[in-house]
């Protein structure tokens, strides 16, 4: 009678196991991994206001480029997470 | 243990299933023969031996059969999972390409807009009489340029954090 639990455990050892399937997390798009450019400075001692305006426009452009990347990262991560978690 | 599994793996699945059923059948037969043998003349003396053999064979057969069924269930699960993973990886790659395309397109539009605006400044704004008058009479003070340039540099603490993050890579 004392041997029953041992026998039962031995008989159930065949039921232990894990599925050897691994899901790979995808590589991020190359565009997203590029660093955001540094902002441009105004060069020179005597600068016309139009030159200053051009630097400001350039920097605004850089901001929008960078914010597009950040939004892209968010979208990419959320979509990949959804796909990753759909495998069960 | 793996040698045993490797050897078992060489036998076709259908054959294995049949072997396990034969072991179980032999175990049950041994048990019944051991139980009934007591009443059969001349045979009764073997009944005592058949019973434990029957029990061992039955236990072994049930264990092997259970393992086989579990193995089949796992294989089925693994196949389904592999299929799901394949579909998911394909979906993930497609999504990555799709997002990459959108970002490239957006960046192109943004750069184009910036370029057009700078060209407009060069072509139109600099020709404006009021602007020309302003440029001639009001140079931008040095301090304004310095403050603007200072704002383009990230704070020292952020720079240090960036450096630390880079060195960890």
Image (tube, coloured by chain):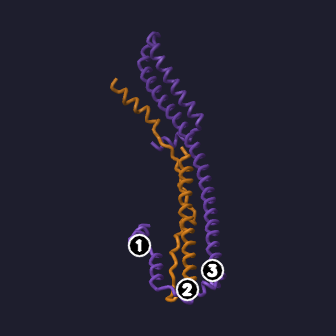
Chain colours: A orange, B purple
Q: Nearer the viewer, mark 1 or mark 2?
A: 2
Residue A2 percent coordinates (x, y): 33, 25
Quarter of the view holding residue A55: bottom right
Task: Name the chain under label 3.
Answer: B
Determine the residue positioned at 60% across, 58% down.
B96
In terms of secondary structure, where does tag 2 sit?
loop
Residue B155, label in figure: 1
Determine the residue positioned at 53% across, 63% down.
A70
Determine the residue positioned at 64% across, 72% down.
B113
Q: Residues within 10 Å of mark 3 (few under 14, many from 20)?
A: some
The residue that disc 2 covers is A48
Q: Residues within 10 Å of mark 2 (few under 14, many from 20)?
A: some
Q: Nearer the viewer, residue B62 or B158?
A: B158
Residue A2, label in figure: none
The residue that disc 3 covers is B121
In terms of secondary structure, where does tag 1 sit?
loop
Tell me the CA gap for discs 1 and 2.
28 Å
């Amino acid at each position: 009678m004392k041997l029953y639990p041992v026998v039962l455990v031995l008989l159930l050892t065949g039921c232990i196991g894990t599925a050897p399937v691994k899901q790979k997390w995808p590589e991020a798009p190359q565009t997203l991994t590029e660093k955001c450019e540094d902002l441009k400075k105004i060069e020179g001692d005597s600068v016309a206001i139009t030159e200053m305006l051009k630097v400001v426009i350039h920097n605004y452009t850089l901001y929008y480029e960078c914010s597009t990347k950040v939004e892209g990262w968010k979208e990419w991560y959320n979509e990949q997470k959804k796909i990753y978690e759909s495998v069960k | 243990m793996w040698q045993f599994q490797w050897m078992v793996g060489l036998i076709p699945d259908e054959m294995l299933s049949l072997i396990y059923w034969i072991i179980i059948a032999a175990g049950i037969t041994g048990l019944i023969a051991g139980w009934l043998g007591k009443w059969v003349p001349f045979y009764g003396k073997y009944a005592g031996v058949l019973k434990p053999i029957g029990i061992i064979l039955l236990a072994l057969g049930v264990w092997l059969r259970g393992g086989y069924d579990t193995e089949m269930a796992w294989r089925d699960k693994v196949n389904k999972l592999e299929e799901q993973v394949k579909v998911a990886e394909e979906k993930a790659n497609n999504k990555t390409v799709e997002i990459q395309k959108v970002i490239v397109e957006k960046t192109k539009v943004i750069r184009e807009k910036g370029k057009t605006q700078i060209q407009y400044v060069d072509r139109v704004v600099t020709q404006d009489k009021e602007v020309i008058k302003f440029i001639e009479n009001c140079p931008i003070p040095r301090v304004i340029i310095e403050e603007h340039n200072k704002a383009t540099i990230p704070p020292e603490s952020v720079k240090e954090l960036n450096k630390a993050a880079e060195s960890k890579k």
